[in-house]
Image (cartoon, rainbow, N blue to C red):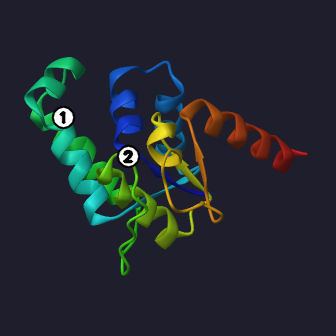
Amino acid sequence: MRIVLDTNVVYQALRDDKGASYYILQLVRQQQTELALSVPAYLEYREVLLRPETLEDLGRSPFEIEAFLRFIAYIAKPISIHFLMRPHLSDEGDNKFVELAFASNSPFLVTSNITHFTRKTELKFDSFEVLTPSQFVQTWRKQHDKQKE
């Protein structure tokens, strides 16, 4: 299963090793789910995670974040974006994640800011669902348990 992660999910995963965001990152690390990654998404991860206030909040060094980003770039499925979409989201910066979800055929875009993707948008997302990290973990567990049966 391929997914798209909003930057806030990656941030939360690095901040707290007990939450759903961290669990999702572990699924990616263990290759139990595939992370779709475009250049714009990667650049946003990098820009946000290397901010001085973010480094301080995470208690991480720039070297540690760069190592993490190299790992993400290595393990993720690279996706090229050929068509830009502008669904008029409340946060225009989130358009890159919608574009990535469409281009990668990911069934899920995981974000902690659901309202950024559902309020005042002209598009209805039929090809993917926008889920919180907790909702995604519940969905993944249900699908994974069915496969075991």
Could you tell me the amino acid type at mark 2? Ser
Residue at image position (56%, 36%) is 132
Q: Percent from the top left, x then y, of residue 78?
A: 38, 68
Amino acid type of disc 1?
Glu
Distance CA(mark 1)–CA(mark 2)? 32 Å
Residue at coordinates 26% horizontally, 46% vertically from top-left?
A: 45
Which is more toward the observer, 111 or 95? 95
Mark 2 falls on what kind of element?
A: loop
Image spot of residue 23 (x, y percent): 53, 31
Callout 1 crowding tier (Cα within 10 Å): few <14, some 14–19, many ≥20:
few
Is residue 57 positioned above or below 97 on the image?
above
Q: Which residue is mark 1?
A: 64
Mark on residue 90?
Answer: 2
Q: Residue furthest right?
A: 149
Quadrant position of the C terminus in the picture:
top right
Q: Could you say which is closer to the camera, residue 129 or residue 62?
A: 129
Foreground residue among 52 and 31: 52
Q: Which circle, 1 or 2, is nearer the viewer? A: 2
Q: Quadrant of the N terminus?
A: bottom right
Residue lying at the far bottom of the rendered structure: 82
Q: Is residue 77 rendered to the left or right of residue 11?
A: right
User: Which x, y percent locates residue 59?
Assistant: 19, 19
The residue that appears at 36% across and 51% down in the rendered structure is 94
- In the visual, does 128 lie left or right of 116? right
User: Secondary structure under badge 1?
Assistant: helix
- 51 is higher (above) or lower (below) than 93: above
Along the line of sight, which residue is nearer the eye, 91 or 148? 91
Counting residues from the start of the chain, the first of labels 1 and 2 encountered is 1
